[in-house]
Image (tube, rainbow, N blue to C red):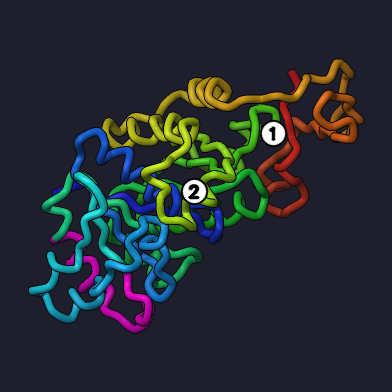
């Protein structure tokens, strides 16, 4: 049976569904047979990102009601990549969670990897998938509210005895804006980093047009490699190697300031790009400050 991997975030809107689609495409392009499961019953949207919304005639709930339809509800996206849509009209509270786990476990026998796009929040849907999956990717953004919710999602996984997970930092704009990796991991209570994925407005446009996996930005694709390696080998990349790769594949046009900054002190920076830009530096963020919401992660850079 193929590995079942849950992608969870705690907070919605951090890019979890987008990553599910792109990661599935990256794995399938390496020859692995992959099934993408939309686990957000009542709020299905993975079909739109995949460009398959017009092909969904039946969904997972139909297969729960009629076992003979188990294979018929799966839609082929591209070579080696398949999709199991969630119901748009039935919620997790209204369906048999045990039947869903049996359905996905049955389908997993035909695939190398099954990626489940979990619903946001902590409820019956996430509980059902946590009982089903063997490994997890925790998706978050460099914002304290996302970090706090992701930390709660990790705690939820631990309550079910899971320890095999890696954190993916999504929508990081530039190397200069990238948060201190070890402060973030401390706040999350996590050990392994899956990757750092760059922010790109093209991704937003492509998700609306349903062409994301065909037109994936190169920098984004390159930064999926550490996650693919983690899934296929079980070993996470070294954090510094991920940071170096992110720096290599993203273009930073800003001119580094020559002034010396102090802790938590804004410094006006005159550059060719924006003479009114302000840089905030802070290297002493702690878990308690992050989780209490007292420290913003947006504009922090490490002091060398």
Residue at 24% across, 48% down: 78
Q: Which residues are magenta?
A: 86-106
* Residue 198 % position (x, y): 55, 37
Measured in 3D between alpha carbons, the distance from the residue under mark 1 to the one under mark 2, in whole angstroms, is 18 Å
* Residue 105 % position (x, y): 18, 59
Q: Residues within 10 Å of mark 1 (few under 14, many from 20)?
A: some
Residue 99 covered by magenta stretch: yes
Residue 277 covered by magenta stretch: no
**The quadrant where residue 272 appears:** top right
What element does badge 1 sit on? loop
Residue carrying label 1: 177
Instruction: Kindly indicate whether the residue at mark 2 contacts the one at mark 1 (C-beta within 8 angstroms).
Output: no
**The quadrant where residue 215 appears:** top left
In this rendering, position of residue 230 left or right of residue 150: left
Residue carrying label 2: 139
The quadrant in which the C terminus is found is top right
First-in-chain label (1 vs 2): 2
Residue at 26% across, 36% down: 29
| Residue 91 seen in this snapshot | yes
Extreme-bottom residue of the structure: 94
């Amino acid at each position: 049976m193929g590995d079942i991997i849950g992608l969870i975030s705690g907070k919605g809107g951090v890019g979890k569904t987008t990553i599910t689609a792109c990661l599935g495409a990256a794995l399938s392009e390496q020859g692995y047979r992959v099934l993408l499961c939309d686990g957000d019953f009542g709020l299905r949207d993975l079909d739109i990102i995949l460009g398959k919304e017009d092909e969904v005639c039946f969904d997972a709930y139909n297969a729960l009601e009629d076992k003979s339809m188990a294979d018929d509800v799966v839609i082929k996206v591209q070579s080696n990549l398949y999709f199991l849509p969630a119901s748009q009209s039935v919620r997790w509270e209204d369906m048999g969670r045990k039947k869903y786990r049996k359905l996905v476990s049955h389908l997993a026998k035909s695939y190398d990897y099954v990626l489940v796009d979990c619903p946001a929040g902590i409820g019956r849907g996430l509980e059902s998938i946590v009982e089903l999956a063997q490994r997890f990717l925790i998706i978050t953004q460099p914002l304290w509210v996302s970090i706090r919710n992701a930390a709660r999602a990790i705690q939820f996984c631990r309550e079910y005895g899971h320890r095999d997970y890696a954190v993916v930092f999504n929508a990081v704009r530039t190397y200069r804006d990238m948060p201190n990796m070890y402060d973030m991991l401390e706040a999350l209570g996590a050990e392994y980093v899956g990757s750092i994925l760059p922010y790109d407005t093209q991704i937003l446009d492509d998700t609306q047009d349903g062409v994301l996996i065909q037109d994936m930005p190169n920098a984004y694709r390159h930064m999926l490699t550490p996650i693919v390696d983690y899934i296929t080998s079980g070993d996470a990349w070294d954090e510094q190697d991920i940071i170096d790769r992110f720096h290599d594949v993203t273009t930073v046009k800003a001119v580094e300031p020559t002034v010396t900054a102090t802790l938590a002190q804004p410094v006006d920076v005159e550059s060719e790009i924006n003479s009114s830009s302000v840089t905030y530096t802070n290297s002493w963020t702690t878990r308690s400050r992050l989780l209490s919401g007292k420290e913003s992660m947006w504009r922090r850079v490490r002091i060398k």
